[in-house]
């Protein structure tokens, strides 16, 4: 009986341990303004990254934006099936929306919109740490 319970409660380790990843995130983003900035601005960063990738020529039949979205979805599903399935759906919707926007805007406008969004979102990511957290940003940065 104990062996059956042990196999069903197998704990993931490393990057696939979603609880450990979330605990680390919360330890670096304690202030509500900083946590909200990261929660709200991470998706536009990913979306505009997908937007620009639609214009990248690829020798493969797979669209680079789709490849990135599928890779992220697979990583999230590997970490947690339920949360990963939701993240996969959000990534699929983001990929489809970025593809439609890329077709509508064309490269000349899309890269400008992506650049403005990236600059705004990344600036607030770093300001969130600098202004609202006692510690510096979570990622190593030479600045």
Image (spheres, grey):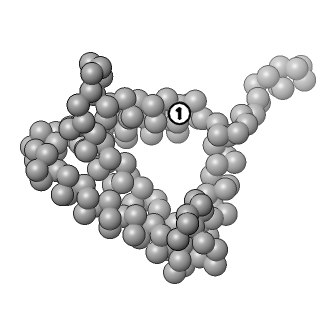
The answer to whether residue 32 is visible is: no
Query: x and y percent of residue 36 in the render?
Result: 47, 66
Residue 109 vs residue 63: left or right? left
The residue drawn where x is 61% and y is 57% is 25
Residue 34, compared with residue 67, is above or below; it is: below
Task: Determine which residue is flagged by label 1.
Answer: 75
The residue drawn where x is 20% and y is 57% is 113
Of 43 and 113, the residue lying toward us? 113
| Mark 1 neighbour density, 10 Å: few (under 14) some (14–19) many (20 or more) | some
Q: Could you say whether the residue bearing mark 1 is in a helix, strand or loop?
A: helix
The residue drawn where x is 55% and y is 66% is 142
Query: x and y percent of residue 29 in the render?
Result: 59, 66
Residue 86 vs residue 139: left or right? left
Q: Quadrant of residue 94?
A: top left
Residue at the extreme front: 142
Residue 131, compared with residue 87, is above or below; it is: below
Residue 28 vs residue 63: left or right? right
Residue 125, compared with residue 10, is above or below; it is: below
**Can you say which quadrant of the picture contains the N terminus?**
top right
Query: x and y percent of residue 22 in the render?
Result: 63, 52
Query: x and y percent of residue 34 in the render?
Result: 51, 71
Of 128 and 76, the residue lying toward us? 128
The residue drawn where x is 25% and y is 63% is 116
The answer to whether residue 28 is visible is: yes
């Amino acid at each position: 009986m104990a062996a059956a319970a042990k196999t069903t409660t197998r704990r993931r380790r490393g990057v696939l341990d979603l609880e450990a990843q979330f605990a680390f995130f919360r330890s670096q983003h304690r202030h509500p303004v900083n946590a909200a900035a990261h929660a709200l601005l991470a998706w536009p960063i990913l979306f505009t990254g997908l937007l620009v990738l639609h214009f990248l020529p690829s020798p493969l039949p797979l669209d680079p934006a789709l490849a990135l979205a599928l890779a992220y979805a697979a990583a999230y599903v590997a970490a947690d099936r339920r949360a990963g399935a939701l993240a996969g759906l959000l990534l699929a919707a983001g990929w489809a929306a970025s593809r439609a926007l890329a077709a509508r805007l064309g490269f000349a406008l899309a890269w400008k919109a992506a650049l403005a969004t990236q600059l705004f979102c990344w600036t607030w990511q770093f300001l969130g740490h600098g202004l609202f957290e006692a510690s510096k940003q979570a990622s190593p940065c030479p600045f």
